Amino acid sequence: MPTNSLHPETLVLHSGSYRSDPTTNSVAVPIYQTTSYQFSSTENASNLFGFKELGNIYTRIMNPTNAVLEERVAALEGGVAALAVSSGQSASMLAIQNLCRAGDNVVASTDLYGGTWNLLANTLKNLGIEVKFADPKDPENFRQLTDEKTRAYYAETLPNPKLKVFPIEEVANIGKEFSIPLIVDNTAAPITCKPIKHGAAIVVHSLTKYIGGHGTSIGGIIIDSGLFDWVHEPKRQPLLNEPDPSYWGISFGKAVPEILGLPIAYLVRARFVLLRDTGAAISPTNAFQIIQGLETLPLRFRVHQENAQRVADFLSERSEVSEVIYPGLFQNPRDRKRNRKYLETGNGPMVGFELKGGKQAGQKFIDNLQMVYHVANVGDVRTLAIHPASTTHSQLSAIDQEKTGVTPGYVRLCIGLEHIDDILADLTQALEKT
Ligand code: PLP
């Protein structure tokens, strides 16, 4: 059905080609727990392998349950196609590997999830892909670090602990001058931020977080905007322009739009080369679980954000708290301008705060929570808390902790869907014991 004019609440339920199961008329999306699919003829098999027909070959590369998830998330983000994979980490990895090989480099924002930081700074480096880190305060820092081997820019929309919104359009525009795509991890800000609208070429999500939403299933997804011109400067994107020896010597950038009539060269290469070779496939059962979450994402995210706003306001009034880190409370004109531009329906679901009593107070606060969960996760229906200085960031020096935005008394809250009065009551009693 045409999706251009539909709202997020409708897109997550109705976008894509799935209406009901063709054999049973089942309305709920079935779990197609199969590895393989019967070809109707040798001609059909050959057409599928040659992209002359689109269809199922083998579940490591595609699956009908996964396809529903892919089509709906692509529509929600305003992209043309998506590829669901085994985790958020594999989505980031494949998104970069689809453009870079040894000797190439990426310019990435300094403000990133710790797992992504490790992937970029260490694992990719060991594979010969250099990642240079740019402070997003000034978008021009991306230009400064760009050279002829730069294949992509990489950033997160709403990175914690600082919760400063990334300047998507400003950096995407610098990239366009060099034919360099911007990849944006939008895990923390679905619904409220639309990176493709602001010029991101590729969006990735950890489906494990808000989209799945219930803390049950690990998954990731890569969304292709269909708007980036991969063949404009062939030397800039060799993996999409050089003949691919693993796929009959075709050049994906040219061949895919010619054969399929769709601007999905990047996504098709990610699926048919990288997913085929690395095997980072999501299981259909996990895709099904995540679809259940996706169907209520817009409603849930509204309440996550409303509750987060209430918690931020509450914490600003507390005598135990020296600072509240929440996009809606930032006073710096640059931050306020970026929030207004990029966060359309709310300031996100996370709130950080600094306790006057430092590290000891942070630990005491966490130990005294009764309802709120103490876990290293984000994006659950339940409210979650963590004290990074004694957990996720404890291995860093005090100076490095400070650089990442983690101070001794900093606590991160991911606000859930409990009644706001119950959330505030638990926070109040724990604050009183710090
Ligand atoms: N991106 C962000 C912003 C995250 O917060 C996480 C996990 O916390 C990931 C990516 C990795 O996701 P996953 O745990 O699904 O691999």
Image (cartoon, helix red, strand yellow):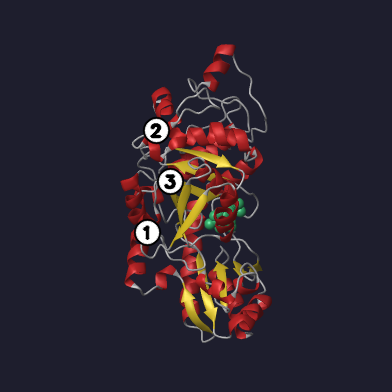
Q: Residue 149 carries which label?
A: 3
Q: Position of residue 68 (x, y in %)?
A: 53, 37
Residue pictured at 65% horizontal, 75% vertical:
366
Q: Which mark is residue 297?
A: none
From what the image shows, is residue 356 above or below residue 310?
below
- Ligand 1, image quadrant it occupies: bottom right
Location of residue 346 (image quadrant) = bottom left
Would you name the residue on which mark 2 appears? 263
- Depth-wise, is mark 1 or mark 3 nearer the camera? 3
Q: Where is residue 406 in the image (x, y as percent from the top left)?
A: 54, 73
Would you name the residue on which mark 1 appears? 167
Q: What residue type is labelled 2?
A: Pro
Residue 424 seen from this side: no
Query: In terms of sequence position, does the residue under pointer 1 or pointer 3 come before the other?
Result: 3
Residue pictured at 48% horizontal, 76% vertical:
324
In the foreground, 153 or 432: 153
**Residue 342 falls left or right of residue 311:** left
Query: In terms of sequence position, does the residue under pointer 1 or pointer 2 come before the other?
Result: 1
In the foreground, 23 or 178: 178
Q: Where is residue 311 in the image (x, y as percent from the top left)?
A: 50, 73
Residue pictured at 58% horizontal, 76% vertical:
398
**Residue 318 falls left or right of residue 123:** left
